[in-house]
Image: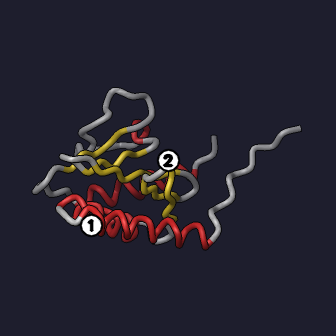
């Protein structure tokens, strides 16, 4: 008989290492992308104080709470926040502007100089956490 148990949360050392790697990524970027990633990271933690930071897929910052909330990727012209279950989230403010064609994920691409509605972003984070907490 097989039971589906939730994955164990990362050990404290793994979480600390992930946070250190994210700090290093932000510092290494040293430009608007680092500042943007740092700002979004702070907003994620403000919206969900119990968020867990992980580092996956050989270099992607990930924020989790009972599953993946979102990832924070950096490219030459955008900082991309991909919500793992974004297609299942209400987005009344229209923050999702990328990866709109998929059945699961949705993303927010932030370009240099762009501002984001912080209240709407916090609502998306909280909605993703709530969705992760649902059964089934």
Q: Is residue 104 left or right of residue 67?
A: left
Answer few, some or many: residues within 10 Å of disc 2's Cα (few below 14, many 20 plus, some between 14 and 19). few
User: What kind of element bears circle 1?
Assistant: helix
The answer to whether any part of residue 92 appears in the image is: no
Q: What residue is drawn where x is 31% and y is 32%?
A: 100
Horizontal and vertical percent position of residue 88:
43, 38
Name the residue at the left extreme. 113
In the figure, 129 relative to 1: above or below? below
Cα–Cα gap, marks 1 and 2:
22 Å
User: What kind of element bears circle 2?
Assistant: loop
How many tags in the picture?
Answer: 2
Query: Coloring scheme of the render?
Result: secondary structure
Q: Which residue is label 2 attached to?
A: 57
- Mark 1 or mark 2, which is nearer to you? 2
Q: Is residue 25 left or right of residue 131?
A: left
The answer to whether any part of residue 102 appears in the image is: yes
Q: What residue is drawn where x is 28% and y is 46%?
A: 108
- Classify the position of the C terminus by image quarter: top right
Name the residue at the front extreme. 28
Task: Looking at the image, tell me whether mark 1 or mark 2 is earlier in sequence order.
Answer: 1
- Tell me whether circle 1 and circle 2 mark residues in contact (CB < 8 Å): no
Q: Which residue is label 1 attached to?
A: 39
In the figure, 60 relative to 94: above or below? below
Horizontal and vertical percent position of residue 118:
24, 61
From the viewer's side, name the closer residue of 124 and 64: 64
Answer few, some or many: residues within 10 Å of disc 1's Cα (few below 14, many 20 plus, some between 14 and 19). few
* Quadrant in the picture for residue 62: bottom left
Horizontal and vertical percent position of residue 14:
59, 67
């Amino acid at each position: 008989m097989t039971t589906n148990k939730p994955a164990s949360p990362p050990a404290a050392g793994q979480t600390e290492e992930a946070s250190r790697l994210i700090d290093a990524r932000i510092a290494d970027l040293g430009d608007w992308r680092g500042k943007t990633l740092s700002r979004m990271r702070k907003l994620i933690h403000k919206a969900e104080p119990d968020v867990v930071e992980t580092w996956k897929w050989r270099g992607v910052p990930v924020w989790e709470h009972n599953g993946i909330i979102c990832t924070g990727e950096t490219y030459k012209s955008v900082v991309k926040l991909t919500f793992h279950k974004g297609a299942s989230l209400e987005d009344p403010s229209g923050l999702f502007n990328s990866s709109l064609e998929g059945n699961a994920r949705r993303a927010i691409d932030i370009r240099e100089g762009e501002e984001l509605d912080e209240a709407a972003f916090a609502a998306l984070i909280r909605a993703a956490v709530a969705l992760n907490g649902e059964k089934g």
